[in-house]
Amino acid sequence: MKSVVTRLKDMELGAVTVAANDVCLHLIKYPMLENNQATDEGSIDIEVGYTIECDGQAYVYRQNGNPAHLHQGVAQLLKLIGHTIVSSVFAEDNKLILAFDNQTSLVCLKDPTGFESFHINLIGDTGGMTV
């Protein structure tokens, strides 16, 4: 599990996809290889909630039974496109903490009932990571 999280470091957020029940972050690691493939790539599907901390403010977006609540924070997520993850930590309380190069932190929150909170999918990794 730790190796999955550490692979996120140095990946750049390339796109944000909004679906009915989740928000997906699409990540890519540069430089590109000779065959125009990324050095590494993957995605994080956020299903329960997240916190964005920037400019001394914390913005919390939690589903709370209504997936539309996740979508309210998309504008904040879009500001992270083109920025690189400088630190990725899986905290003891089952939160994924990503620090970006623009001094913004993204925390994927854990569902208190044990529901799958987020899923990390990495190219070449058969299992990924579901929390």
Image (cartoon, rainbow, N blue to C red):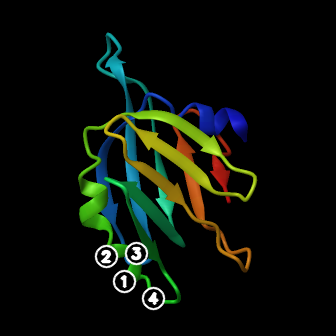
Residue indicated by mark 1: 68
Q: Which dot marks residue 70?
A: 3
Q: Indicate which disc, 4 or 2, sits on the residue closer to the N terminus.
A: 4
The kind of residue tagged 1 is Ala
Dot 2, how many residues are within 10 Å of its Cα: few (below 14), some (14-19), or many (20+)? some
Out of 75 and 47, give the one closest to the viewer. 75
**Residue furthest bottom in the image:** 65
Residue indicated by mark 4: 66
Proximity of marks 3 and 1: CB atoms separated by less than 8 Å: yes
Proximity of marks 4 and 2: CB atoms separated by less than 8 Å: no
Marks 4/3: CA–CA distance: 8 Å
Q: Is residue 125 visible?
A: no
Out of 16 and 76, give the one closest to the viewer. 76
The kind of residue tagged 2 is Gln
What residue appears at the point 62 percent right and 42 percent down from the top-left corner?
89
Proximity of marks 2 and 3: CB atoms separated by less than 8 Å: yes
The kind of residue tagged 3 is Leu
| Percent of width and height locating residue 32 | 32, 18
Q: Quadrant of the N terminus?
A: top right
Marks 2/3: CA–CA distance: 6 Å
Proximity of marks 4 and 3: CB atoms separated by less than 8 Å: no
Proximity of marks 4 and 1: CB atoms separated by less than 8 Å: yes
Proximity of marks 2 and 1: CB atoms separated by less than 8 Å: yes
What residue appears at the point 36 percent right and 83 percent down from the top-left corner?
68
Q: Quadrant of residue 53?
A: bottom left
Marks 2/1: CA–CA distance: 7 Å
Marks 4/2: CA–CA distance: 11 Å
Q: Quadrant of the C terminus?
A: bottom right
| Percent of width and height locating residue 74 | 29, 66
Marks 4/1: CA–CA distance: 5 Å
